Amino acid sequence: MTRGFHARWAGALPGFCLLAWTVLAPGGAGAGEPFEVSIERNVPAKMRDGVVLRADVYRPKAEGKFPVLLARLPYDKRNVASCLKAAARGYVCVAQDVRGRYASEGEWYPFKYESQDGYDTVEWAAALPWSNGKVGMFGGSYIGATQYLAAIARPPHLAGISPNYTASNYHDGWTYQGGAFEQWFNQSWTTALAEDTLNRRVESGSDAVRWTQALPLASYPVLDASSVAGLAPYYTDWLMHPDYDDYWKQWSIEDHYDQIQVPVFGLGAWYDIFLGGTLKNYVRLKAKAGTPAARGGQRLLVYVSGHAGSPAESKVGAVDFGGKLPIDVNEAVLRWYDWLLKGIANGVEREKPVRLFVMGKNEWRDEEDWPLQRAKATRYYLHSAGPANGLQGGGTLATAAPGDEKADRFVYDPNDAVPTIGGPLCCKPLPTGIGPQDQRPAEARADVLVYTSPAFAQSTEVTGPISLELYVSTSATDTDFTGKLVDVWPNGFAQNLTEGILRLRYRNSQEKAELANPGEVYRIALDLWATSNVFLPGHRLRLEVSSSNFPRFDRNLNTGGDQARGTQMVKATNAVYHDKSHPSALVLPIVP
């Protein structure tokens, strides 16, 4: 979502009218004199099944034809302020309410119609009187999903897409992660979207209106059917499909990379909830996109922000990243399209394909590829001279392999879960903040294992994908294991960098759950996604291991039963082994 979409959830339009007026908007750098802009509201586009979707069309008030930039969104098309800048720069900019949202007809169900409606809308936009036939798409979050789902349908006039902070798979990395339900995101996003659905039904006099209050955030049990009845059936469907099954595969971008035939400029943020998907899309499209032009046309920009945050500001969460961080994302996208769709030699053609903001040093850097080829996978093994429970424990990290060491154990009680403190969150704030925050309150708990390295004598850069290999056991038939990478400042501030989770029943596959045998030792791998951070001299590397991160993720009830409807909880005694036969390790990409 572009900035502002989460801040304002407008109600349904009181009527569908077509109107136009003229404004004067500033142009962008290198765009020449700005055009006056004409805006037409609620322009209808009929889809293949007869459903009419409506769009606002911004265009230069000038003779001639122009490339089209298209955003298809469920958040109210009136919020796409960037269209004004695009039209003043010489584009026809189309902002369309997707099916079942605001001014558009039909029933809203995430992902279901976006390929066919995306195809039809691209071809409709290409045929507008002011269009030169070239269509590019833009926008973030779900608007990124509408781009990818349109691209895999291969509309002939689609020339490029520019998705910002969006997923690659709507099961893992959107609704679930490592098999755990993304509770805070799923409930807050669903609640916000249900408002327009409710408004539409009230206006139509529908008998189906049975929902009178928002879905309780962090509700328990996770499936609170009374709160979503009739208004968000997809939320129930998501919970009824915890495995990666055919319900999810029909919409998976990962299974259809070979159908994408256009260049992609992907954007993301280090503290975004969809960072993993952003990076995966770039890597896999370079290998699997359907044409050489698409494989060679991949671009990637990663900045520092939370989801739908403002990279125009230097402070994110509790950390000020300095004056070099602020970036105009809209300008970056328009500049790319100036080159791709207009053929303007503005320097994009000479630039390296990857641009990253490196935290710690707090500077931008251009790279030939992602992951960095020069980064060396380095194992930091878990050790403990005594129990590693909490900050006062004896947990350490070192590149030396372990010898004979005792396992570390903790009791995970779902009734007293480890709280989420910052990190990648959407779509409502927690009292503990978003993005980088001080993790010491969580690290003081006995159910958090803390492993810390000695202070670095010189700057040490970690840039790339990060994984955590653990040998674990549990007294339960199912539980979760979490991992969090932390940069500890000399003053003790513990800055979270990236994190991950694995539901033990999905240790072998997310397609088929397998309960655990209590007491049996399993080797598991947690995907901690990625970061780019320089540990400055005097800073220390820290790893947190636990079994909950609530309410970002739902609490594992430890029973092995139905997580969605379950109400019974049991405590679990969980163990992490780190000895010669069980060398648990954090695997980091160290840049020489």
Image (cartoon, rainbow, N blue to C red):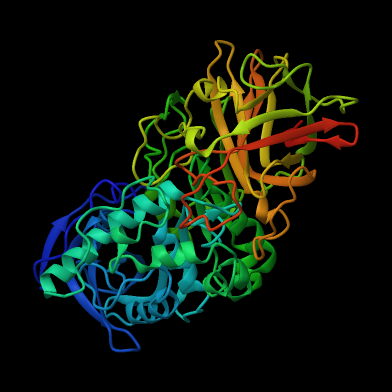
Residue 461: image quadrant is top right
**Which residue is farthest top?**
491
Is 587 situated above or below 280? above
Left or right, 535 with respect to 32, comes to right
**Which residue is farthest bottom?**
49
Residue 27 seen in the current view: yes
Residue 360: image quadrant is top right
Instruction: Residue at 60%, 48% (x, y): give it.
Output: 354
Instruction: Residue at 22%, 54% (x, y): give it.
Output: 213
Instruction: Residue at 33%, 82% (x, y): give it.
Output: 127
Left or right, 45 with respect to 302, comes to left
Q: Position of residue 221 (x, y in %)?
A: 42, 51
Instruction: Please name whichever residue, 507 or 357, is drawn nearer the observer in this view of the structure.
Output: 507
Residue 343 seen in the current view: no
Quadrant where the C terminus sits is top right
Q: Position of residue 329 (x, y in %)?
A: 41, 47
Is 150 situated above or below 592? below
Instruction: Please name whichever residue, 16 or 92, is drawn nearer the observer in this view of the structure.
Output: 16
Q: Position of residue 136 (x, y in %)?
A: 42, 67
The number of numbered discs placed on residues in the rendered structure image is: 0
Is 240 situated above or below 276? below
Instruction: Residue at 27%, 57% (x, y): give it.
Output: 80
Is 327 situated above or below 492? below
